[in-house]
Image (cartoon, coloured by chain):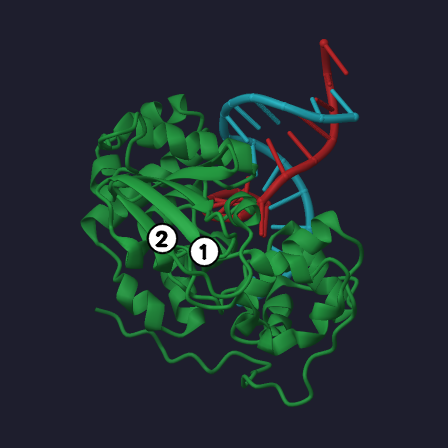
Chain colours: A green, B cyan, C red
Amino acid sequence: MRHHLSVHGPLDLDLTFTCGQAFRWTPEKGAWRGVVGRAEALVRRDDAGEGLVVAASGEDPGARAWAAYLRLEEDPAIHLAGAAELRSIPGFEPLLGLRLLRQDPWETIASFLCSAAANIVKISRCVEGIASRFGDPIPGTARRAFPAAATLARAREGELRALGLGFRAPFLLETARSLDKDPLSWNTLQRAPIAEARATLQSLPGVGAKIADCILLFGLDRLDAYPVDRWIRRATMEMAGRRRAKDRELDEWALRLGPGRGYLQQLLFHLRRNGGPLPRLTPLPQAPVARRRHAPPKRSRSRA
DNA sequence: TCCTCTCCTTGCTT
DNA sequence: AAAGCAAGGAGAG
């Protein structure tokens, strides 16, 4: 099936598919080919350069689903509310073509479990390998869908290691088994306070703060999640004017970037890695989000 | 409770 | 060619 989609705001497909949020897209003659759910798609700008053409095979979810996946309905600039001054940085404006994809939560969990101490090429190899070994075929292509947690739960650790997962293999296996046995409610994770959602995800083996935030941002439509990795740690300390800072402090400081801070995180990642230094921003005088210097008193844990 | 260090795999880079 | 490095996490001390 072939869909013609309209686009609101700037769109940079190259940046969107190479920025490290998704791992099943490859360039193909001015277009991008990838697997989403049980479909494979070829995505390209239309001849006028205004809209988007999506040609899908397999179980095509339909035009609306593709538009939602690519987040075409909103202008990315709406997420800059908390830090409009960043727009004056040279090289910032073109990055606004980056779209945060709305990806499947489980596939996002599995993908980012593969991301520990890895790079994008490595992650892609692992994810593609898992799909080709355990996924269902997709009609019209040699590529396969990403397997369900229940499927991976029955895999053997050696099979995953053979795909190059290394020390990540037991994490993925145990997480798949955990989710197969006790599924998480994606709906709840999307509504819960960010700290709560993050804590829930961190209960999965192999999922720490950084990967939990990536799952929230890329797989659960939580643009208020702000994953702090080595690059963002540096970028945030720079903007906060700090030479050293704990991750908790950086999390707290990042609140000033507003509810779209997760989107900004993506842009900052590129700016800090490819560009020069970042401007210093101070915390907002009247922080929009209440902040506590100390954790609330803990009630004694009730025992079952 | 918090901080720091080390190990865990793999493959590409220096 | 050995060492370093890469969008981390867990366990020890």
Question: Is A239 or A198 nearer to us in this picture?
Answer: A239
**Residue at image x 43%, y 66%?**
A222
Q: Chain of mark 1?
A: A
Q: Amino acid at mark 1?
A: Gly
**Horizontal and vertical percent for residue A281?**
74, 74
Q: Determine if residue A214 is in view.
A: yes
The label shown at residue A51 is 1
Q: Is residue A229 left or right of residue A3?
A: right
Label 1 and label 2: CA atoms lie apart by 7 Å
Q: Please say if the residues under marks 1 and 2 sit with CB atoms less than 8 Å apart.
A: yes
**Horizontal and vertical percent for residue A43?**
42, 44
State the image quarter where residue A185 is shown. Answer: bottom left
State the image quarter where residue A91 is shown. Answer: bottom right
Q: Is residue A105 left or right of residue A164?
A: left
**Horizontal and vertical percent for residue A201?**
38, 58
**Horizontal and vertical percent for residue A47?**
48, 47
Q: Amino acid at mark 2?
A: His
**Residue of label 2:** A4
Quarter of the image with the C terminus of chain A is bottom left
How many neighbours does mark 2 have within 10 angstroms: few (below 14), some (14-19), or many (20 or more)? some
Q: Determine if residue A256 is in view.
A: no
**Residue at image x 61%, y 73%?**
A257
